[in-house]
Amino acid sequence: MTVATKKQVHNYSAGPCILPQEVFEQAAQAVLDFEGSGLSILEISHRSKPFEAVMAKAQSLVKELLGAPDQYQVVFLGGGASLGFYMVPMNYMRVGGKSAYANTGEWASRAVKESKLVGETTVVASSEDKNFNYIPKGFEIPADADYFHFTSNNTIFGTQWKQFPKSPVPVVCDMSSDIFSRPVQVNDFALIYGGAQKNMGPAGATVYLFDPERLGHTGRKLSPILDLKNHGAKESMYNTPPVYAVYVSMLTMEWMKRMGGVSAIEQRNAAKAKLLYDAIDRLPQFNGTTAVEDRSPMNATFVLNDAALEPAFDTLWKEAGISGIRGHRSVGGYRASMYNALPIESVQALVDVMDHFARKHG
Amino acid sequence: MTVATKKQVHNYSAGPCILPQEVFEQAAQAVLDFEGSGLSILEISHRSKPFEAVMAKAQSLVKELLGAPDQYQVVFLGGGASLGFYMVPMNYMRVGGKSAYANTGEWASRAVKESKLVGETTVVASSEDKNFNYIPKGFEIPADADYFHFTSNNTIFGTQWKQFPKSPVPVVCDMSSDIFSRPVQVNDFALIYGGAQKNMGPAGATVYLFDPERLGHTGRKLSPILDLKNHGAKESMYNTPPVYAVYVSMLTMEWMKRMGGVSAIEQRNAAKAKLLYDAIDRLPQFNGTTAVEDRSPMNATFVLNDAALEPAFDTLWKEAGISGIRGHRSVGGYRASMYNALPIESVQALVDVMDHFARKHG
């Protein structure tokens, strides 16, 4: 069994993305022999006591790390946040009711589309006019909406809500790309959900953290597989959960706890973001693509002033062992995703490349 | 890294279940270093070329192993077969149309319930009258149904359809617990689907093998996340797929191919089933719970003639390193699940215990 030397690769993938090296080692061990049972984590029943303990631990770690009130429940489902986009209106929009959305990017747009399939949907704020390069401010959320939905961090465009909107109605938030990167007031949300494959774990699980009291009021006859209240009541075991993705998420959350929790992680993330954005601002060869006040510490998007020099820049970062910083086609240029597990050394490696490039092409 | 000696445990879990030992070793290696990339399979982008190759290989192996016609498509989705129960009527039942189902167990019943939420649903055959201990025969499928749905193998009750019903309408089959255990005529099915966590791989992926020409005719405005035609057109990448579950499924299918394919595996399975069912029939202390002609080679259900001796029997099989043969609460007694990867040596170990028990309590 070969243990890879991770430092050879600076993994800036936008998701699925880097997880802590020690998590990979524990996760590989469990595939061979789960907790000394002689069985692989991949072959044990989800109804076995050892896996029930994993599930319970993963659920309690979500609540502990985010400081969630007791009555909130946690479930891990398959299908991705994209299934969540559909489940949100099905679970929260009354029959004949309506929803309010902020449209701040590709995934927010997809969430809006799903809500429109279910019922009346108002986009109360949008940054589409400037290719989603900022976070809208100063908008009104109608008091008669059943809920307000927004996307806390926009992976593709590199923006993040720094302050969450005040809402007269229950708030639902897709936190796929910045959950566990900073403290949140869970009480302010009816539902927080997110795909695991950024800060929480590997692809294959989606976490839903919700107040069960807010559910079951739509008047809609809901399929049990789409019914968050049902999944909560069944403790995330209504059907076979994505066992391994839950297990690796649990390991990653244990790592977050060892790192000092979400507040300590926020500080690490802020230091990484400062290092990179300072370079973007300091070096005239680079330009950030988003409004400065809305810059995401998770995904930094930037372009070269002279796009003709992209091949030269690409050669440099590839030589430095950097991977995954090509920008999304909707923005172009570059995107450096700096999720929780990315070490600051990787950010320094990128900044060194940028400095080197700037000296060469100054 | 400790490589477990699998032979210490005879894993009869009903699912998630045993996979080949060599698959566990490859699967653990990829968590540490995927194909020498220096990256874990858990941290690479699903849009990266190496994972696109994994997905393409997994899709083609499904078709190759089952001998599917060219035009059939394969997708791997999250959410389990339980999400499939809902997707089936949403994708195949016309608005105002109707469906026909055979109800042969717990999972078939759940599929019926989901169809009833979507539209008119007729149960054309059922074995519920005898606690699902047989497969119904000689029933009619209405020619005006949009599709006929059945469950090829009933994990909990231990029955299997040996011959598939002739149907005047498109056939949809949940093969979760016996896919890849025997050859099938894919052409006879509009859709074959199944949770990975029996013969195909770990929990977290559900495979759908379908003829795209049969889709898109319901007149229903379908959410893209529930739309099989959409998933097929996007080559199973409409949203982030369950990367690791697809990868381990690919490894398991490669193993099946090395084993000689599905016909060779069927013979191995028949030999294992014969060994166990012969013991059940030979030893007066044991009784099979299902109709003999409908016995599943995947899940053998049996009881002790004298239930008071269960603790004595339990002690014996536990001492022999056997795990996971407690029967489901709806049947009681015992259930020995003998999926593709269970070696015949494990079946022999169980038969030895049964013989020993019979001698002791003869």
Image (cartoon, coloured by chain):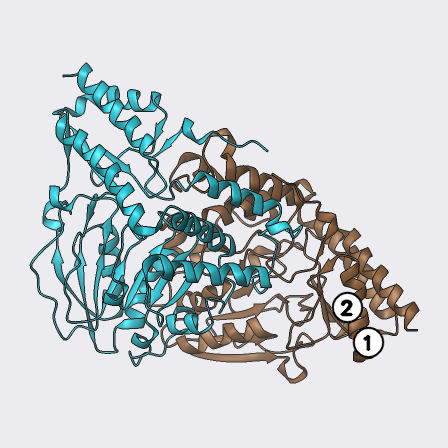
Chain colours: A cyan, B brown
Q: Is residue B247 left or right of residue B359?
A: left
Which of the 4 quarters of the picture holds residue B356? Answer: bottom right
Instruction: Quadrant for residue A217, please give it.
Output: bottom left
Q: Secondary structure at mark 1?
A: helix
Report how far apart the C-alphas of labels 2 and 1 lie in the structure.
9 Å
Is the residue B150 above or below the residue A66 in the image? below
Residue A340 percent coordinates (x, y): 33, 43
Q: Looking at the image, which residue is at 61% across and 75% down?
A: B104
Q: Is residue A10 left or right of residue A242?
A: left
Chain under disc 1 = B
The residue that disc 2 covers is B314
| Residue A343: x %, y % from top left | 35, 35
Q: Residues within 10 Å of mark 1 (few under 14, many from 20)?
A: few
Q: Which residue lies at the image location 51% right of the left edge and 74% below the top edge? A: B110
**Residue A146 picture location, percent across and down:** 21, 73
Q: From this view, report whether residue B261 is shown above or below residue B155.
A: above
- Height in image: A62 above or below A7? below
Tag 1 residue: B309
* Amino acid type shown at disc 1: Leu
Quarter in which the N terminus of chain B is drawn: top right
Three-letter amino acid code at disc 2?
Asp
Classed neighbour count for the residue bearing mark 2: other residues with Cα under 10 Å, few (<14), some (14–19), many (≥20) = some
